[in-house]
Image: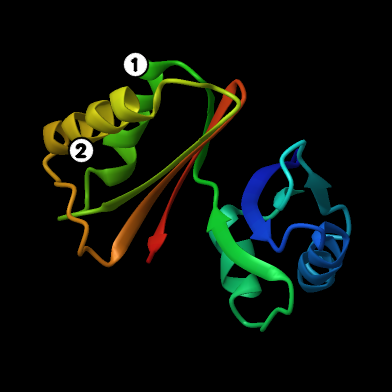
Amino acid sequence: MNKKPIILVTCKVGSEDWCIEEIGNVLYPYDNSVEVIKTKYRGLLIAYSKLSAYEAYKLLLTREYGFVRNIIPIMITVPFDENLLYNKVKEVVKNTNCVKIKLRIRGVRGYSQKIWMGLVNAIRESGSKHDPNCNTCLFIEVIDSDVYIGLREC
């Protein structure tokens, strides 16, 4: 089984090395090939592992952290293409009543509002709805030419 991106981690800017250590210390006993990589964006890391995203996410929730700010399980990674993104979002949210959209676009300018509206429409077409008060968050993280999609409790 190959390693794949399973977790996005945000941390205090300037504390990336400490975050790598915190995340690595939790996951290493379960996958000694785990890698936590810095992106070119300060405070943003990606963990690669043979573990499933939710298996790693559950393990990571068992600890408290000094430098980690947010942990997002990565369900799907696709190249940045609007139609592909919307189709994957429909798959992810089809069994939910509502989701709260958390969209972050890095490295691509001028798309936020257009992508936001497309996401709202895709969610509606799936039979779900966007609700800012929902307890389920749909994370859409665009990092340059890739999109990372995650779903978890807010």
Q: Position of residue 113 (x, y in %)?
A: 31, 28
Question: Is disc 1 in contact with disc 2, using a CB cutoff of under 8 Å?
Answer: no
Answer with the quarter of the image where residue 40 lies. Answer: top right
Question: Which residue is identified by label 1?
Answer: 83
Locate the C terminus and report the quarter of the image it occupies: bottom left
Residue depicted at 22% across the width and 63% down the height: 134
Residue depicted at 54% across the width and 22% down the height: 108
| Left or right position of 20 against 87 | right
| Left or right position of 111 against 17 | left
Disc 2 packing (10 Å; few <14; some 14–19; many ≥20): many
Residue depicted at 68% across the width and 55% down the height: 51
Question: Which residue is identified by label 2?
Answer: 123
* Helix, strand or loop for disc 2: helix
Q: Position of residue 50 (x, y in %)?
A: 73, 49
Answer with the quarter of the image where residue 137 lies. Answer: bottom left
Q: Which is nearer the eye, 64 or 78?
A: 64
- In this rendering, does residue 25 appear at all? yes
- Amino acid type for the residue under numbered disc 1: Asn
User: Of the residues under marks 1 and 2, which one precedes in the sequence?
Assistant: 1
Residue depicted at 60% across the width and 26% down the height: 107
